[in-house]
Image (spheres, rainbow, N blue to C red):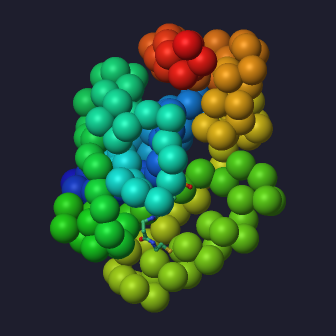
Amino acid sequence: MSTIKSGLPSGLVAIYPGSFDPITNGHLDLIARGSRMAGRLIVAVLRNQAKHPLFSVEERLEMIAEVVKPYPNVEIAAFEGLLVDFAASRGATMIVRGMRAVSDYELEWEMALMNRRLKPEIETVFLMAGEEYSFISSHLVKEVAALGGNVSDVVPPSVEQRLKKRIAARKG
Ligand code: PNS
């Protein structure tokens, strides 16, 4: 199998799953780095009826599509059910997750071990968040934006605009 610059196989399909409500600069950093490791990187948005998202799955997919244009090997998808089943259905053998701080570790560890138990052939790989992104979460971004704070340096401009519009609409 041929290899890409990183030395990883270019046929490698990786999946980067999450809620992405909305996508932040931290996610985008992970996508940029993940896309260099895999032949194809699928950004997969969970359809989760249980949560009360600010943006619909379709809106989140649109926002992601707007910002991943510079990465030709990045694809976008929505999924429901088990992540490992979706990954297998797309031929992905690697799950990419970001690790921001020690507080992320416990949940990520549980998910990685459960996913490995479910499908041992799929490997979870953790990328350390860049230090400038290690405090960013979609949850905090929404809270700060809703309270009128500036989020221009933590989300892409297109996402900031949508956040402003959505929050204004909810208030109005
Ligand atoms: O961005 P998030 O909310 O931390 O992402 C969590 C996500 C989507 C990766 C996780 O909830 C998930 O994989 N859900 C799919 C259901 C599943 O496979 N559950 C078992 C995993 S241990």
Question: Along the horizontal axis of the image, is 78 left or right of 162?
Answer: left
User: How far from the left and from the top, in percent, is residue 89?
Assistant: 19, 67
Q: Is 67 located above or below residue 157 in the figure?
A: below
Q: Is 132 located above or below residue 95 in the figure?
A: above
Front residue (pair 23, 102): 23
User: How far from the left and from the top, in percent, is residue 128?
Assistant: 66, 49
User: Could you say which quadrant of the image residue 137 lies in?
Assistant: top right
User: How far from the left and from the top, in percent, is residue 90?
Assistant: 20, 61
Q: Is 53 located above or below residue 62 in the figure?
A: below
User: How far from the left and from the top, in percent, is residue 58?
Assistant: 29, 36
Q: Residue at x 60, y 18 (%)?
A: 171
The single residue placed furthest to the bottom in the displayed view is 117
Quarter of the N terminus within the rendering? bottom left
Question: Along the horizontal axis of the image, is 139 left or right of 159?
Answer: right
Question: Along the horizontal axis of the image, is 23 left or right of 15?
Answer: right
Q: Residue at x 54, y 22 (%)?
A: 170
Quarter of the C terminus within the rendering? top right
Front residue (pair 105, 73): 105
The single residue placed furthest to the right in the displayed view is 102
Q: Residue at x 61, y 37 (%)?
A: 138
Q: Residue at x 34, y 21 (%)?
A: 66
Residue 20 showing in the rendered view = yes
Please give the count of numbered marks on the rendered protein.
0
Residue 4 showing in the rendered view = no
Question: Along the horizontal axis of the image, is 152 left or right of 47?
Answer: right
